[in-house]
Image (cartoon, rainbow, N blue to C red):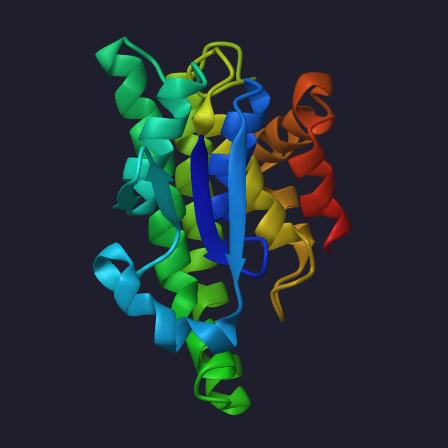
Amino acid sequence: MIKLIYFDFNFWRIDILRLSLSYSNIPYEYERILRKDWINKKKNYPFAQLPTMIVKDKVYSHTHSLAHFCAKKSKLYDSDDYKAIIIDQVLDWANEITNKIAPSIRAAMREKDLKKSERLRKKFIKNDLHLWFFYLESLLKRSSSEKLFFTDKFSIADITAWRVIYWFTSGKLDLINASFLNKLPLLKKYYEKISCLEYFSELSEFKEILSSN
């Protein structure tokens, strides 16, 4: 049994693991840790980070590494090296754009400095929001012949891209209007198609993510 551990809220880093396993009907256990308990528990986890995965009493961490494991188990990775590097680029893109917006989130959540958070968020919107989604759309153009999936076959790259786009268009991020996606018509069309894939949208994890908005 695979056990996944994360905080007590939905986020793409854990959701892409859960969605991948669920897609292939691979059973897993899921433990949520309350934020208030994390300070006392973090020393028990590799790199003092989440998500963490436990398999056969071994503990593993780092989103990209866990995503590889879950994708391979779920047949959502690719044995072709040139397809695999496309998938890896989407995973790295997700991490990069998260790092770009993270300072504005930390300012609000940890520092409780809303003015600083607003200033940093406006800076992110001006300098990074459109640029980094443009990078993702450009990768889709370069890598996909049909523009439906990044590698022309449903993979964890599509799960990751969908989950991060949903995060940015869900209304949960202050000052970010979902209309920014209108300037990226190919990416918007791609996102809408992924959202309607029956074998993906019927997953209980997919429905949970949408219902938590």
**Residue 156 drawn above or below residue 115:** above
Q: Can residue 142 be seen in this view?
A: no
Q: Nearer the viewer, residue 32 or 74?
A: 32
**Residue 162 drawn above or below residue 124:** above
**Residue 127 drawn above or below residue 203:** below
As drawn, is 170 to the left or to the right of 65?
A: right
Q: Position of residue 174 (x, y in %)?
A: 62, 70
Q: In the image, what residue occupies the spot 28% across and 37% down?
A: 65
Q: Position of residue 43 (x, y in %)?
A: 27, 68
Q: In the image, what residue occupies the spot 50% across and 72% down?
A: 35
Q: Quadrant of residue 208?
A: top right
Q: Quadrant of the N terminus?
A: top left
Furthest residue toward right: 211
Q: Can residue 46 be seen in this view?
A: yes
As drawn, is 42 to the left or to the right of 7?
A: left
Q: Quadrant of the C terminus?
A: bottom right
Q: Where is residue 212 in the image (x, y as percent from the top left)?
A: 72, 54
